[in-house]
Image (cartoon, rainbow, N blue to C red):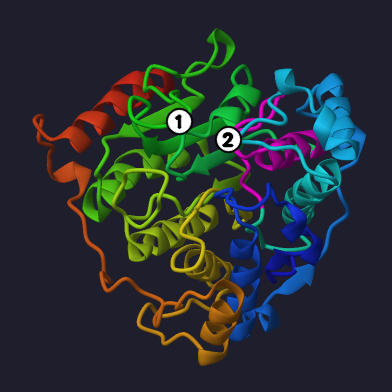
Amino acid sequence: MSGRAQLMWDEAVTGYDFGPGHPMDPVRLALTRSLIGAFALDREVEVVAAKPAGESTLRLVHREDYVQAVKAASADPAAADGSYGLGTLDDPAFAGMHEVSALIAGQSVGAAEAVWRGDAVHAVNFAGGLHHAMPGGAAGFCVYNDASLAIARLLELGAERVAYIDVDVHHGDGVQAAFWEDPRVLTISLHEHPRTLFPQTGWPEETGASSAEGSAVNVALPAGTGDAGWLRAFHAVVPELIADFRPQVLVTQHGADTHFEDPLAHLAVSLDAQRAVQVACHSLAHEYADGRWVALGGGGYAVVDVVPRSWTHLVGIAAGREIAPETVIPESWRQEVYARTRQLGPMRMTDGRWPVSFADWEAGYDPADRVDQAVLAARRAVFPLRGLLA
């Protein structure tokens, strides 16, 4: 293994553009890449542009008729077939949609291949993490499910145990669905409770098919959960499951929409807590997966203030050059932000909450606390299926 991290990047991924006014503004990708450059992190990683996922790769997860429907909508957006989730308010059809979606998927597949083969110890595709796309349909701003495709490629290459951790504010429903019957894949999703947020799935009782009981884990957190509760829930569930499963590769999805500024959801997590979970995922990869770590982006709609900082921290962690939270952001980047968006960029790489702290689960729980109730529901649903104490 080379020991060097890879950053998967092709400028063309910014063409994933649903149009003016859509929350998934590709400026978030461009500004993230610029901030990575402003901190010279691209000198610490190997920047790689992988090839787009071909049809045979896409069919590892997606049905052939769906791929053909995406291609048709890509060629003629006005004729998009709504029965496949295309041409909707969430997923408007646009020219070139198939090509850019396949390109993003290709970056995640390339990341998985590099990590599995030892070309890199870690690989990051912050343009990826499009976890809502289903085998036969688009959903939730996602056309092709690059996270599922990366995992499917790892299995194709011979991996026997792959763990997927999803900390996006929305349930990682598409990845869970793709591997619902496969005990080789452990999916863990921490998300806002389905009662209050799309896609209304991710209940703790969703634990996998009979052939893979205990392979799906869902921690459904109450709206308003902040740093202490979010970190407590993560550490009360995730490390014990990863230690038991002992994955050969860890794939993580780092949607930044848990943030208190995000306009589409209701958690109250800071950038500093997001960074803490990124550090924890990195540590878990080294402790249990020989360092093999594929890290993806995801949601995040505070496109100036939150997303670029969160994912730049992610790249710094993967590169072995963590950016201290109190670090001042280069003025050149802030000028670019203003030129592109007419917004003022943030001043530092922190929300002022570092170091973040939380109460350890082993110290006891409060049965009246809603976060503790969510943790306990997840543990009771899954831990006994895996031979663990709830």
Q: Which mark is residue 198?
A: 1
In the rendered image, the vertical position of residue 243 relative to residue 4, given as above or below: above
Which residue is more in the foreground, 207 or 53? 53
Q: Quick check: marks 2 and 1 in contact, CB under 8 Å?
A: yes
Q: Residue at x 58, y 35 (%)?
A: 140
Tell me where the magenta segment starts and ends, as one range.
Answer: 128-157
Tell me what residue is drawn at x 50 percent, y 53 percent: 300
Amino acid on which disc 1 is placed:
Phe
Label 1, secondary structure: give it: loop
Instruction: Give left or right: position of 239 versus 112.
Output: left
User: Residue tagged by mark 2?
Assistant: 140
52 sits left or right of 91 in the view? right
What's the residue at 34%, 19% (across, down)? Answer: 381
- Quadrant of residue 260 within the rendered picture: bottom left
The residue under label 2 is which amino acid type? Gly
Q: Residue 2, how many percent across, how many down?
A: 74, 69
- Label 2 residue SS: loop
| 12 to 332, vertically: above or below | above
Judge whether residue 51 is colored magenta.
Answer: no
